[in-house]
Amino acid sequence: MRGRILQDKYFNAIYLRNIPEITRCLNKGVNPNVRSSEYGVAPLHLLAERNDYILGYRLLECKDVNADLKSVHGYTALHIACNFNCKRFVGLLLQKGADPNLCDRLNKSPLHIAVERESYGIILKLLKAKANVNVLDCFENTPLSVGIVNVNNLLIVKTLLQYGVNMSIEHRRSLHIFFEAILNCRSINQIDFIMLLLENGVNINTRETKTGRNCLHFVAITGYLELAVVLVQKGAKWNAIDTRYRTPAKVAMEHGNEILADYFRKGYRPPNLLTTLPLVYLWTSKLKLRLTEKRAQQEQEHEHDAK
């Protein structure tokens, strides 16, 4: 009973930042790692959420404090500090020996969370503390895939690649990050992510294991002509056949992307990548005009048949 009263006093002192009372509780032998029965968090978790550097420093000076203690939800103080973008507290925890590679119940590491929050300063601190850049969470997301698909942050992606991203880990995902990046590519800026992957060891003609599709099959789904031109210029095979004997042109037609299908069939090749995009716009406008004329002609024929 006395121990429970002492624990309650300790939690109240932490919550109110009553440093003399905290000191008295610690001197009386309170367990500094005790979790709240109501919320399942320890004092260090609360201080991490509040970014209370001063009190956190005092608490971590106690030899019995466990910097890697997990809450009932599986979060360490480092997870929480990353989630709330508490850069200084992250630095304190790492300085005091917190493990940057512990994962929560979803197998998310602090690095996953820092990338999700686009906290570049925290990402650098974690990477310098030997955070694993190749960890997969339970949804098969790596920090790299989060940076490319979820937040579209080129600086973060470049930094992760500099710290030893292993592209072979991506083959353990249901869909390789290369193909996922293509499916999510909707702008010229996003093409940069795909170019980075190619520069860092991804084979442009790699195939999806189950369906045999290559990168152009995936572009055929989205209909993004600019990306298709860039990939063909880089050496992607426009006549590749998947396990259902479909070429990228056929897939493009199945998804209503007639302009892209026509591009694949005509075998158009720009002279070099620097002149690709202006030619793409010219190519697109010509094809759109041709399709408009074709549809107008079909409508006239239908009207004539109706009469």
Image: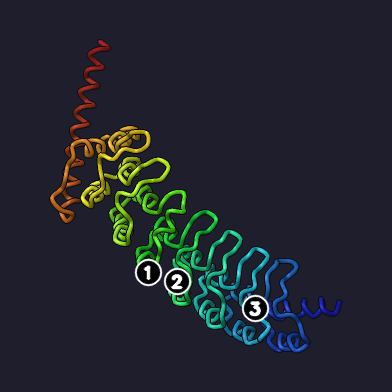
Judge by depth and name the residue closer to the eye, 38 or 30: 30
Mark 1 and mark 3 lie on one chain; the one further toward the N terminus is 3
Seen at 74% across and 80% down, the residue is: 31
Quadrant in the rendering for residue 23: bottom right
Which residue ends up furthest to the left in the rendered image?
Answer: 271
Mark 2 and mark 3 in contact? Answer it, CB < 8 Å.
no
Q: What element carries label 2?
A: helix
Q: Is 159 positioned to the left or the right of 261 in the image?
A: right
Query: Percent from the top left, x then y, of residue 60?
Result: 62, 83
In three-dimensional space, the C-alpha distance between marks 2 and 3, rounded to whole angstroms, equals 23 Å
Amino acid on which disc 2 is placed:
Ile
Q: In this view, does 227 lie above or below 11?
A: above
In three-dimensional space, the C-alpha distance between marks 2 and 1, rounded to whole angstroms, equals 9 Å
Judge by depth and name the residue closer to the eye, 97 or 91: 97
The residue tagged 2 is 123
Which residue ends up furthest to the right in the rendered image?
Answer: 1
Q: What element carries label 3?
A: loop
The residue tagged 1 is 159
Query: Percent from the top left, x then y, of residue 160?
Result: 39, 67
Residue 11 seen: yes
Q: Is 72 positioned to the left or the right of 78 in the image?
A: right
Seen at 78% across and 87% down, the residue is: 28
Q: Is residue 110 above or below residue 91?
A: above
Amino acid on which disc 3 is placed:
Asn
Give the numbered dot on residue 66: 3
